[in-house]
């Protein structure tokens, strides 16, 4: 039987080792994460996992929408992305109530002169005078996967032209909503927000400093956070924006008139306030997982290895699917294991692809082969690729870099980049993937990964000179 003193020493060593491991694995993570179950609704027994940190009550999330889309796009967020958010508001161009939640018109923050005279406000004037009467019906293309050509609302452009005017007044309205918030997060109605990852990401920043965080874009030399990917302002940044804009409302309205997006106008105010954009890529995304290339690299940052905070161009089914996936992830791994882009691709996207999917467009676009251009090609596979799905597959198989292809009415398209794409009900397009090559691609991306989680405040200023040489708008 072991000596008692020896047993005590062993126990002390075990306790010490566990303590050290816990300390090391908690470095950089938000403090005091608590996981609890929250009822889905008063009429449902479903429970959801809502990890929270001490920071949760200090964040206000703003969802921006418009009357031409709100009734179709907004409700899904009340049962998914906003379920775990303690403080949120919905801003629009029309006061209404959706599923018991107030939706607020923020355009009162634009000068009366502009609202009366500018043609962009034609829809707003109609709403003020007639409400929804006479508006074009909101139409939805039903699809299992949405993204840029799937489950999307087909509305006229009046709502889009009006949308740019919401950005500046919504800053003032958001601040009035919760003046004690440390962070203000702005998303759109087709944006997915990973709440657990957001809290972990924001915990790496000092909220007493003026921060402007988002996916970088440029228009005419103005760098700004792309609204569709979501962006974040700290309270000091909010105060500076309000102080900068308030005495110069007409100046910034003139700027907004001559630019086609409001996120650029907000970026201008922030630039004038001497608050640079902290580039949130790859955590903030302008695409949905269905249309995103997992091998994407921007500003010398890989996408694959890092946690996601937002995704854009998400249809209602996609938002619901990603929400369920994230819930399953939390149930299996807990809140301290961050959900990364690679997890979405390997565990959510990869199981949905196959050697052949009918009525599906996987966005293969590297090169197209058809009878007109390739019937007399010297390459036998190219000469026949347009004839059938099987011939198209044979062409892809003959090209070592090809990982996927699609065939549609005498046209074969191949691609060396991976994308899942979306369903096209009733159409003849068929898509296929070379599954062994997809797995090889994913494995190669995995080899790049290290132990880093976030591109946080320590990365401020990095790659800025290089990016300025490429100033262009690209999502």
Image (spheres, rainbow, N blue to C red):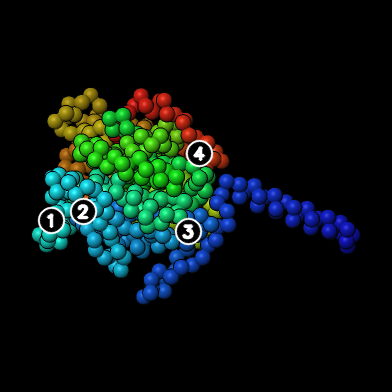
Q: Mark 3 points at which residue?
A: 57
> In this orientation, which residue lies closer to the viewer: 263 or 415?
263
Q: How far apart are marks 4 and 2 (CA)?
A: 37 Å
Q: Mark 1 points at which residue?
A: 126
- Of mark 4 and mark 3, the one earlier in the sequence is 3
Q: How far apart are marks 4 and 3 (CA)?
A: 22 Å
Q: Is residue 123 left or right of residue 289?
A: left
User: Helix or strand or loop: what does disc 4 sit on?
Assistant: helix
- Of mark 4 and mark 1, the one earlier in the sequence is 1
Q: Please provide percent x and percent y for residue 103.
A: 28, 61
Between circles 4 and 3, the one closer to the viewer is 3
Packing grade of label 3 (10 A; few <14, some 14-19, many >=20) is some
Circles 4 and 2: CB atoms closer than 8 Å = no
Packing grade of label 2 (10 A; few <14, some 14-19, many >=20) is some
- Of mark 1 and mark 2, the one earlier in the sequence is 1
| Residue 122 versus residue 384 in the image, above or below | below
- Of mark 4 and mark 2, the one earlier in the sequence is 2
Query: The N terminus lies in which quarter of the figure?
Result: bottom right
Q: Name the residue under label 2.
A: 153
State whether residue 277 appears in this view: yes
Query: The C terminus lies in which quarter of the figure?
Result: top left
Circles 4 and 3: CB atoms closer than 8 Å = no
Q: How far apart are marks 1 and 2 (CA)?
A: 20 Å
- Of mark 3 and mark 1, the one earlier in the sequence is 3
Q: Please provide percent x and percent y for residue 364.
A: 28, 39
User: Helix or strand or loop: what does disc 2 sit on?
Assistant: loop
Q: Mark 4 points at which residue?
A: 457
User: Helix or strand or loop: what does disc 1 sit on?
Assistant: helix
């Amino acid at each position: 039987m072991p000596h008692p003193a020896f047993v005590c020493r062993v126990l002390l060593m075990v306790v010490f080792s566990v303590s050290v491991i816990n300390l090391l694995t908690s470095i950089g993570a938000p403090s005091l994460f608590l996981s609890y179950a929250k009822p889905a609704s008063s009429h449902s027994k479903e429970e959801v996992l809502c990890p929270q940190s001490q920071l949760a009550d200090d964040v206000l999330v703003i969802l921006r929408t418009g009357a031409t889309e709100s009734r179709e796009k907004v409700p899904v967020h009340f049962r998914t992305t906003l379920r775990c958010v303690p403080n949120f508001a919905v801003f629009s161009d029309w006061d209404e109530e959706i599923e018991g939640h107030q939706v607020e018109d923020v355009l009162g923050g634009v000068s009366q002169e502009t609202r009366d005279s500018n043609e962009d406000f034609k829809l707003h004037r109609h709403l003020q005078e007639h409400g929804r009467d006479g508006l074009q019906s909101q139409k939805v293309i039903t699809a299992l996967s949405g993204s840029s050509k799937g489950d999307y609302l087909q509305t006229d452009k009046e709502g889009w032209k009006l949308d740019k005017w919401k950005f500046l007044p919504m800053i003032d309205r958001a601040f009035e909503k919760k003046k004690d918030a440390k962070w203000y997060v702005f998303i759109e109605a087709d944006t997915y927000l990973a709440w657990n990852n957001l809290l972990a990401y924001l915990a790496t920043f000092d909220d007493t400093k003026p921060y402007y965080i988002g996916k970088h874009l440029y228009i005419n030399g103005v760098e700004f956070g792309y609204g569709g990917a979501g962006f974040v302002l700290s309270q000091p940044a909010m105060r500076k924006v309000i102080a900068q804009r308030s005495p110069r409302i007409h100046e910034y309205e003139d700027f907004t008139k001559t630019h086609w997006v409001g996120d650029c106008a907000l970026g201008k105010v922030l630039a004038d306030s001497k608050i640079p954009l902290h580039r949130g890529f790859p955590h903030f995304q302008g695409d949905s997982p269905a249309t995103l290339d997992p091998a994407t690299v921007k500003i010398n940052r890989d996408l694959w290895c890092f946690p996601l905070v937002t995704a854009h161009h998400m249809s209602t089914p996609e938002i619901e699917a990603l929400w369920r996936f994230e819930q399953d992830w939390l149930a299996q791994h807990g809140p301290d294991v961050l959900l990364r882009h690679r997890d979405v691709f390997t565990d959510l996207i990869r199981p949905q692809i196959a050697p052949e999917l009918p009525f599906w467009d996987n966005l293969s676009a590297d090169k197209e082969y058809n009878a007109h251009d390739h019937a007399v090609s010297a390459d036998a596979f190219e000469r026949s690729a347009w004839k059938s799905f099987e011939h198209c597959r044979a062409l892809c198989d003959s090209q070592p870099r090809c990982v996927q292809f699609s065939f549609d009415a005498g046209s074969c398209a191949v691609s060396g980049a991976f994308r899942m794409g979306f369903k096209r009900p009733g159409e003849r397009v068929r898509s296929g993937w070379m599954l062994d090559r997809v797995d090889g691609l994913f494995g190669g991306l995995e080899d790049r990964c290290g132990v880093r989680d976030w591109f946080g405040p320590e990365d401020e200023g990095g790659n800025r000179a290089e990016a300025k040489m490429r100033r262009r708008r690209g999502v």
